[in-house]
Image (cartoon, coloured by chain):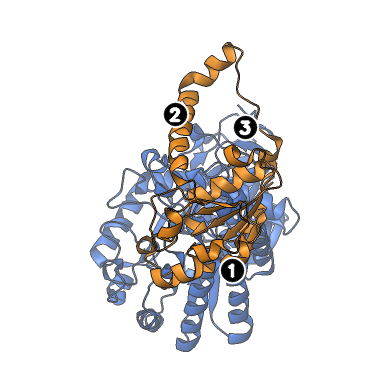
Chain colours: A blue, B orange
C-alpha cells in the first residue's frame, strides 16, 4: 500500500481497494472519489468518472469500510480526565477505525443538562478527529430518582438516553423514562442489571469464581434486568436498546421480545464477550474485570450465534478507561472496565469473519450501518454526498497489542500482549487521514 | 490432622459452615484433595459456592449425614451479621441445623475429632460442651497454626533458597495439586 499521508490532497480517488458498503450490501472492487472531505462519487465494480488530473491513491489489499461508529464509549470528560479525555478518547477511536462515537453520560457532572452536553459536543468538534455524539442521562444526576429533562437534552443534541454504568432500579421510573423518551423520539439504551443480585460480585458466578474464591455475579442479574426492561418496553410500546449483552439467557429473552412480543428492541455486545470467558481470570488480572463480567464458554457461543443471526444488531466496545494505579490492585478492589476501541475490529474480525461465521460486510454492518440507523446518526454508507469517513482495513495483518501501541490514556486492555489478526491501517475523517498504523506496514508485523 | 491420623489419603474430612465465604474451606479443599482425602462440605445451601462439587468434594446439607463417616470435622465460624444480604434466617436456625453439639457427635465414629479455625461462636456453630470437651483439638490447632505461619514466613523471606543451598530442600509439590480444577 502506498498512501503518502503527508501530502494527501483535497481531491483524490481511492483505487484497487475492496469496497465494503453494508448499506448496499456490497463487498467487492470499486473506486471512491473524494473531494473536499465529501464522497463525490462511488463506483462499485468500475472506475469513477474523475478526470485523469485527480490523483489516484492505490490501496491494493485494503478493504475500505465506512468509518466505524461506537455507540458506547466512556471518555471520562468532564471530571475524570486523568483516565481519558475527549481528545485522547478520539485518538483511541480513530486508531480503531472509528469516525463516530457516542459518549456515555457517567461523567462529573453527568450529561443531564443541556449546558454540559453542549460543551462536550463543542469540545468534540474542536478536537476534530471524529464525530463525537452524546448520550443524555435518564435521571437527574444519574441518581435514579427523578427523570432528567429529555426535551432539554434533545435540543442540545443528544442521540440517545441512558444511565449507563447503572440500571434504573425503580421499574416505575424506568417505565416513565421509556414513555417520555418515546414521546420525544429518543431511543433509551438500557444498562439492564438487577443490582440486588449482582451485589458483592466481581466476576461471573460459576465454576471459576468458586475455583478462584472471588464472589460472583450470577447470570440472573443480567437476565432479570433485561427481562424487566423488555417487558416495560412491551408495556409502553417504547423502542429500547440493550447494552453490553453477555449471557445466553438474556439473548433468549431478546429473541422472544423481537420475534413474539413485537418489541422494537436492538441489542449490542462488546468484542471481549466474543473472545473471552471467565476461565481467563485464572491469574486474577484486573484488566479482565468488567461489568457485565466475562461469562462461560456456552454464553460466548450464544453471543457469537446471536451476532450471526441478528439477535444482536451491533458491536459496541463499552470502552472504559481507568488509570494504571486504579487497575493495578487486588482483583476485588479494582474498578470494573476495560478499553476496547483499538482492538474492536481485530477481535470481532477474528471471531466472526476469520472463523467463517459471516462475511466482512456483515461485520462492518454491525459496526457502522446498524448503529447509525438505530440512533439516527450519520455514517455507515459509502455513497456520494456522504462525508468521506473510512476505516482502511488489512484483514490479514497480524499485530501485537502492546501498551506503547495504544493511543488511549489508559492501558487496561484485556488483549494486552496478544497477537490479533486484522488491522486498521488508516482512518480517514472528512477526507483527511487522522490515523495511520506503523508507517512501513507489511503483511505480517514482526512481534516483539 | 497429620499429627493425629498420619497419612490422610482415604480419610474423610467434613467441613461445616459458610463454605462460600470461607478461605479456610477453600484452602482445606485444595490441600486435602492434594493428599488424597475425601472431603464433604456441609452448610446452608445459600452459602454453598456454585459448582463446588467440581472441586472434587461431596455436598451434603444434612449435618448428621455429613459427619457419619468423618474422621475429622472442621467447624467454620459463622458471621451472620457480615452476610447482611439475608442469606440465612439467623443464629437460632443455624445452630439447630448446623451447630455441632454432643448430640451430633454421638452419631460419629468414636475416634472422630473436632477442629475449628477460631475464633469460636460458642452456642452457634459449636456448642460450648464440644468446644471445651474431650473430642476437640482446637488449642493444639492454635499452637500448630503459629508454627506453620512462622515456617511460611521463613520460606517466603528467602529461607527456601537457603535450605536448597544447604541440601535441606523442601519437598516437591504433590502432583495432585495441579490436577484440581483442570
Q: Return the chain for callout 2.
A: B
In the rendered image of this protein, does residue A439 appear above or below residue A275?
A: above
Nearer to the camera, A182 or A247:
A247
* Numbered label attached to residue B62: 1
Whether residue B140 is visible, yes or no, is: yes
Location of the N terminus of chain A (image quadrant)? top right
**Frontmost residue, A249 versus B169:** B169
Q: Which mark is residue B150?
A: 2
Q: Are marks 2 and 1 on the same chain?
A: yes
The residue at the point 39 percent across, 83 percent down is A175
Q: Residue furthest top?
A: B166
The Cα atoms of the two marked residues, 1 and 3, are separated by 66 Å
Task: Locate residue A169, reporting x and y percent.
Answer: 37, 74
User: Which of B182/B125 is in front?
Assistant: B125
Q: CA distance from mark 2 to mark 3?
A: 57 Å
CA separation in Å, label 2 and label 1: 37 Å
Q: Residue at x 48, y 26 (%)?
A: B156
Callout 3 secondary element: loop
Residue B138 pos. (x, y %)? 46, 46
Residue at mark 3: A441
Q: Is residue A399 left or right of residue A144?
A: right
Q: Percent position (x, y) of residue A387?
A: 49, 57
Considering the numbered disc 1 on the image, is that residue within a helix, a strand or a loop?
Answer: loop
Counting residues from the start of the chain, the first of labels 2 and 1 encountered is 1
Amino acid at each position: 500500500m502506498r498512501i503518502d499521508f503527508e501530502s494527501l490532497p483535497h481531491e483524490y480517488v481511492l483505487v484497487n481497494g475492496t469496497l465494503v458498503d453494508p448499506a448496499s450490501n456490497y463487498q467487492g472492487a470499486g473506486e471512491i472519489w473524494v473531494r473536499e472531505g465529501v464522497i463525490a462519487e462511488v463506483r462499485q465494480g468500475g472506475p469513477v468518472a474523475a478526470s485523469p488530473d485527480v490523483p489516484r491513491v492505490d490501496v491494493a489489499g485494503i478493504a475500505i469500510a465506512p468509518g466505524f461508529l461506537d455507540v458506547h464509549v466512556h471518555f471520562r470528560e468532564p471530571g475524570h480526565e486523568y483516565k481519558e479525555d475527549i481528545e485522547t478518547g478520539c485518538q483511541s477511536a480513530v486508531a480503531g477505525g472509528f469516525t463516530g462515537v457516542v459518549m456515555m453520560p457517567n461523567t462529573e457532572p453527568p450529561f443531564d443538562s443541556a449546558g454540559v452536553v453542549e460543551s462536550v459536543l463543542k469540545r468534540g468538534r474542536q478536537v476534530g478527529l471524529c464525530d463525537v455524539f452524546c448520550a443524555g442521562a435518564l435521571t437527574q444526576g444519574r441518581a435514579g430518582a427523578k427523570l432528567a429533562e429529555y426535551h432539554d437534552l434533545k435540543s442540545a443534541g443528544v442521540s440517545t438516553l441512558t444511565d449507563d454504568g447503572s440500571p434504573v432500579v425503580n421499574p416505575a421510573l424506568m417505565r416513565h423514562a421509556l414513555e417520555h423518551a418515546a414521546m420525544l423520539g429518543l431511543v433509551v439504551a438500557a444498562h439492564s442489571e438487577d443490582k440486588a443480585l449482582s451485589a458483592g460480585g466481581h466476576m461471573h458466578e460459576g465454576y471459576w469464581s468458586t475455583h478462584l474464591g472471588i464472589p460472583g455475579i450470577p447470570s440472573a442479574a443480567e437476565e432479570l434486568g433485561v427481562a424487566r426492561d423488555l417487558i416495560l418496553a412491551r408495556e409502553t410500546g417504547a423502542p429500547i436498546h440493550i447494552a453490553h449483552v453477555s449471557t445466553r439467557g438474556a439473548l433468549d429473552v431478546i429473541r422472544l421480545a423481537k420475534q413474539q412480543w413485537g418489541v422494537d428492541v436492538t441489542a449490542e455486545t462488546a468484542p471481549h464477550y466474543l473472545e473471552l470467558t471467565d476461565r481467563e481470570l485464572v491469574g486474577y488480572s484486573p484488566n479482565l474485570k468488567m461489568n457485565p463480567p466475562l461469562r462461560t464458554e456456552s454464553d460466548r457461543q450464544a453471543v457469537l450465534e446471536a451476532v450471526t443471526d441478528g439477535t444482536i444488531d451491533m458491536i459496541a466496545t463499552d470502552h472504559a478507561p481507568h488509570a494504571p494505579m486504579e487497575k493495578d490492585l487486588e482483583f476485588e478492589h479494582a474498578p470494573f472496565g476495560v478499553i476496547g476501541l483499538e482492538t474492536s475490529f481485530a477481535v470481532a474480525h477474528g471471531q466472526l469473519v476469520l472463523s467463517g461465521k459471516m462475511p466482512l460486510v456483515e461485520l462492518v454492518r454491525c459496526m457502522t450501518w446498524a448503529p447509525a440507523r438505530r440512533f439516527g446518526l450519520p455514517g455507515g454508507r459509502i455513497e456520494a454526498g456522504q462525508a468521506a469517513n473510512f476505516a482502511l482495513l488489512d484483514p490479514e495483518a497480524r499485530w501485537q497489542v502492546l501498551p506503547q501501541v495504544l493511543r488511549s490514556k489508559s492501558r487496561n486492555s484485556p488483549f494486552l500482549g496478544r497477537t490479533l489478526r486484522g488491522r486498521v491501517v488508516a482512518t480517514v475523517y472528512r477526507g483527511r487521514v487522522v490515523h495511520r498504523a506503523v508507517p512501513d506496514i507489511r503483511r505480517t508485523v514482526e512481534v516483539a | 490432622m497429620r499429627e493425629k491420623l498420619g497419612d490422610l489419603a482415604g480419610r474423610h474430612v467434613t467441613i461445616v459452615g459458610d463454605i462460600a465465604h470461607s478461605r479456610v474451606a477453600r484452602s482445606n479443599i485444595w490441600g486435602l484433595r492434594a493428599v488424597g482425602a475425601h472431603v464433604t462440605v456441609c452448610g446452608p445451601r445459600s452459602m454453598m459456592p456454585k459448582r463446588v462439587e467440581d472441586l472434587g468434594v461431596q455436598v451434603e446439607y444434612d449435618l448428621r449425614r455429613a459427619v457419619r463417616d468423618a474422621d475429622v470435622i472442621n467447624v467454620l465460624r459463622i458471621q451472620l451479621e457480615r452476610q447482611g444480604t439475608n442469606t440465612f434466617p439467623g443464629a437460632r436456625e443455624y445452630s439447630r441445623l448446623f451447630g455441632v453439639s454432643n448430640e451430633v457427635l454421638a452419631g460419629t465414629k468414636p475416634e472422630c475429632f473436632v477442629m475449628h479455625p477460631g475464633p469460636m461462636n460458642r452456642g452457634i456453630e459449636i456448642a460450648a460442651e464440644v468446644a471445651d470437651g474431650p473430642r476437640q483439638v482446637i488449642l493444639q490447632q492454635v499452637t500448630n497454626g503459629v508454627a506453620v505461619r512462622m515456617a511460611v514466613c521463613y520460606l517466603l523471606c528467602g529461607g527456601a533458597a537457603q535450605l536448597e543451598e544447604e541440601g535441606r530442600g523442601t519437598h516437591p509439590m504433590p502432583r495432585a495439586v495441579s490436577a484440581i480444577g483442570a
